[in-house]
Image: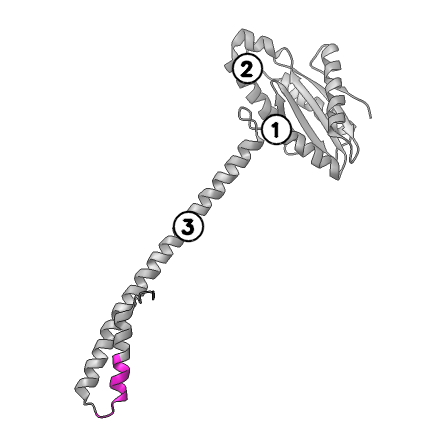
Amino acid sequence: MTEPDLFDVETATLELARKVLAQESLDAVAYRSALGDLIKDYDRLLREMRRLIRRSDRAEREMNELNAQLQHLTEQLDHKAKHDALTEVFNRGAIFERARNHLQNGPLSVIVLDIDLFKSINDQFGHPAGDSVLQELSGRLVGTLDGVGEVGRVGGEEFVILLPARSLADAIVSAEMLRQAVADRPFAILPQRRVTASFGVSHSKTAGRFEDAYARADQALYDAKRQGRNCVVHAGA
């Protein structure tokens, strides 16, 4: 089965014009008639081409818009997959993966922290207040680091901070700055209650195991709790 010719009228007119041109004995009227048919059908052909081009341009614009929406949706899904819904910092899986990647390329200092007596905040003021504290704490951590490190929430009130290529001494200084950022200013939701956090710090060389670095920083955090909370303890070189 042959495909239909969208321009069969123009094709037939063109073929008739060729036949007229081949006949040398025809008079001017016949030539003018053939030329008139050509002009009429060529005009229709131009209109049809313009319509098709406009339709094609519109389809291309719609396709570009759909592609942009798809790209935006993909970025949103990727962001949600890697970030904690409440605090907008990295979630546990993402921050652990980034830590392992950093250790493949260089040394890494790790800070583990959690809010002191956080359960009492939830019990006394309610979980919405506790959520607000977590959100403000995350903002203070990110703002204090000012792009130097990466922050992740690993569960409840516990956070992990990665400092790639930073020495243990630098990490201890950063942890102390973060401790002060938490403790020195009241939280908006709890102006009447002081909120503090305890910090544990460790350092690993290139190609070290993040699980070991995390465990040592977590043990240092536990030691900070035993020493009275609201302090920084490091796990040694």
Residue 24 highlighted magenta (yes or no): yes
- In the picture, the quarter occupied by the N terminus is bottom left
Q: Distance between the residues labelled 2 and 1?
A: 19 Å
Please name the residue shown 67% across and 25% down the image: 160
Q: Which residue lies furthest to the right in this view?
A: 237
The disc label shown at residue 142, or none: 1
Please name the residue shown 22% across and 76% down the image: 37
Please name the residue shown 67% across and 30% down the image: 96
Structural crowding at the residue carrying mark 3, measured as other residues with C-alpha within 10 Å and reported as few (<14), some (14–19) or many (≥20): few
Relative placement, left or right, of 95 versus 126 is: right
Q: Which of the two discs, 1 and 3, labels the residue nearer the N terminus?
A: 3
Label 3 sits on residue: 63
The disc label shown at residue 130, or none: 2
Residue 149 seen:
no
Relative placement, left or right, of 18 versus 152 is: left
Q: Which of the two discs, 3 and 2, labels the residue nearer the N terminus?
A: 3
What percent of the width, then of the height, locates residue 155? 61, 20
Mark 1: amino acid: Val
Please name the residue shown 25% across and 72% down the image: 41
Q: Which residue lies furthest to the bottom in this view?
A: 25
Q: Residue furthest top?
A: 124
Count all numbered tags in the image, as a single digit.
3
Residue contact at pointers 1 and 3, CB within 8 angstroms: no
Mark 2: amino acid: Gly
Magenta range: 16-25
**Nearer to the camera, 8 or 34:** 8
What percent of the width, then of the height, locates residue 118? 61, 12
Structural crowding at the residue carrying mark 1, measured as other residues with C-alpha within 10 Å and reported as few (<14), some (14–19) or many (≥20): some
- In the picture, the quarter occupied by the C terminus is top right
Q: How far apart are marks 3 and 2 (CA)?
A: 45 Å
Q: Which of the two discs, 2 and 1, labels the residue nearer the N terminus?
A: 2
